[in-house]
Image (spheres, rainbow, N blue to C red):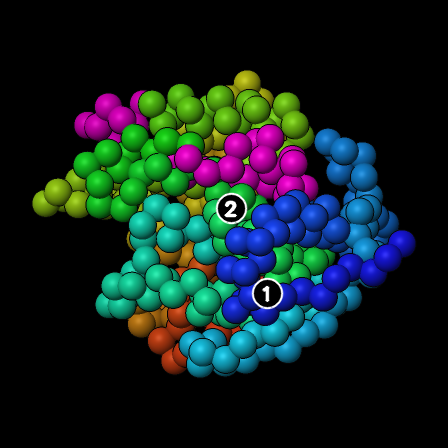
Amino acid sequence: MSPAPAAPSVHELVRIRAEHPEAVAEAAARRQRRPLLRTADSSAPDLNPVTGAGAGAGTGTGTGTGRGTSTSPGSGADTGTVTAIGTGTGHPGQLMIIAADHPARGALAVGDRALAMANRFELLQRLCLALSRPGVDGVLASADVLEDLLLLGALEDKVVMGSMNRGGLAGAAFELDDRFTGHRPEDLVRHGFDAGKLLLRIDHEDPGSLDTLHAAARTIDAMAALRLPVFVEPFLCRRVDGRLRNDLGAAAVATSIAIASGLGGTSAYTWLKVPVTEEPEDMARVMETSTLPAVLLGGEVGDDLDGAYAKWREALRLPTVRGLVVGRSLLYPVDGDVAGAVDTAVSLLRPGRDG
C-alpha cells in the first residue's frame, strides 16, 4: 500500500480547497481511527459498527504514531504537519476532547476579546498544538474546521466529533430555534467520524424550544440506528434583558439532564455533556439524575482557570462523569500557554479508571 501523502501546512489549505476539493474525502478515508473510549485492555483494533472496518482500515501507514512540530500559537508562524503524539492513554475509560464548534454559530468571543476565534489560521495552530499534547483524545468541531484538521493530518488516532445543530446563532432572536445546520448522521458515517454532538437549550417561554426538542429526539434516533454515539448538551435557560442566560442552578441542571436522558426511542448511544453547577458541591446530587455517561463542558471561565480546574477535578470523581470537553479556556488561556493549559486539564483525569 502506498504511503499517505505529507500533510499540508495551514497556508496551503486554501489552495488545496480551491484546486482539489476531493482531498477532504481522501484524507477522511486514510485517517486512522480508534475506539471512542480506550480501556486498559483495548489494544485490539476497533471495529466500526457501520462499516465493519478496523481502526487502521483505509490508512496509508496503519501506525497511528504520527509526529510533527508545533509553534507558539498566535505567532503567525507555520504549524507544518502536526499530528497526534502516540496512541496510548493515561486515563482509560475517560475522554479528553478539545471543543472548537463555537464559530459556526457566530460565537467568536473569548472573554473580552470579541473576535478571538475569528482568525482561522491561528485557531488551527492552537488546535493542532492542543491535539498534539499527550492524553488528548480528540476534537469537537463543525465540518469546516474538522476538514481543515483532516487535511493537516491532525486527526490521526483521534476521536472526531461533529457538531450537528449550529442554527441557533449567538444573540439572534431565533437563537432557541436551534436547527440542524451542521453534520447529519450520514455525513458522520461518510467521513468515518466517531460521534456527534447536539446543543439542547430549553426556555419554557420560547416556543422555538419545542422544535429544537423534537428535532433533537429524531436526531438521537437516527444516530442510534447507525450505532453512533451522540453527545447531548442540555440547558434550561431564560432571557434576561433580551440576552439568553443558561441557568446553572442545581434544580435547572438536574431537570435538563432528565429531559435530555428521555429523548428518542433509545438512549443506548446517548451521552450527556453537562456544565458544573453554580454551586460545585451540588454536582454529586445533580449527577444522580441519570445513568447515562457524561462529560463536563468548559464554558466561560473568565480569568479564573485555576478555579475551573478545581471544579472539574471534583466533578470528575463522580461515577457517571467520564471526561472533559473543553474549548476556549484551553485554546485561549489568559497567559497564552495552550500546551500548559491542556496538560493541566489532562492531569485532572484519573489514571487507571476503566469502564
Question: Can residue 282 be seen in the rendering of this structure?
Answer: no
Q: Is residue 234 magenta?
A: no
Above-or-below relation of 225 to 342:
above
The residue sitting at 37% across, 53% down in the picture is 103
- Element carrying mark 2: helix
Question: Can residue 220 be seen in the rendering of this structure?
Answer: yes
Above-or-below relation of 347 to 161:
below
- Element carrying mark 1: helix
Q: Position of residue 293 (x, y in %)?
A: 57, 41
State the residue in front, 104 or 7. 7
The residue sitting at 81% across, 56% down in the picture is 60
Disc 1 residue type (three-letter): Leu
The residue sitting at 40% across, 70% down in the picture is 332
The CA span between labels 1 and 2 is 17 Å
Q: Hey, which residue is sitting farthest front in the picture?
A: 19
Left or right of 131 on screen, residue 168: left
Q: Position of residue 245 (x, y in %)?
A: 23, 46
Above-or-below relation of 323 to 51:
below
Q: Magenta stretch: give its range.
A: 181-210
Mark 1 or 2: in front is 2
The mark that comes first in sequence, 1 or 2, is 1
Number of numbered discs present? 2
Disc number placed over residue 143 in the picture, else none = 2
Disc number placed over residue 131 in the picture, else none = 1
Q: Is residue 186 magenta?
A: yes
Q: Quadrant of residue 120?
A: bottom left
Q: Quadrant of residue 119?
A: bottom left
Whether residues under marks 1 and 2 lie with C-beta atoms below 8 angstroms apart, the answer is no
Q: Position of residue 329 (x, y in %)?
A: 40, 65
State the residue in front, 13 or 184. 13
Disc 2 residue type (three-letter): Ala
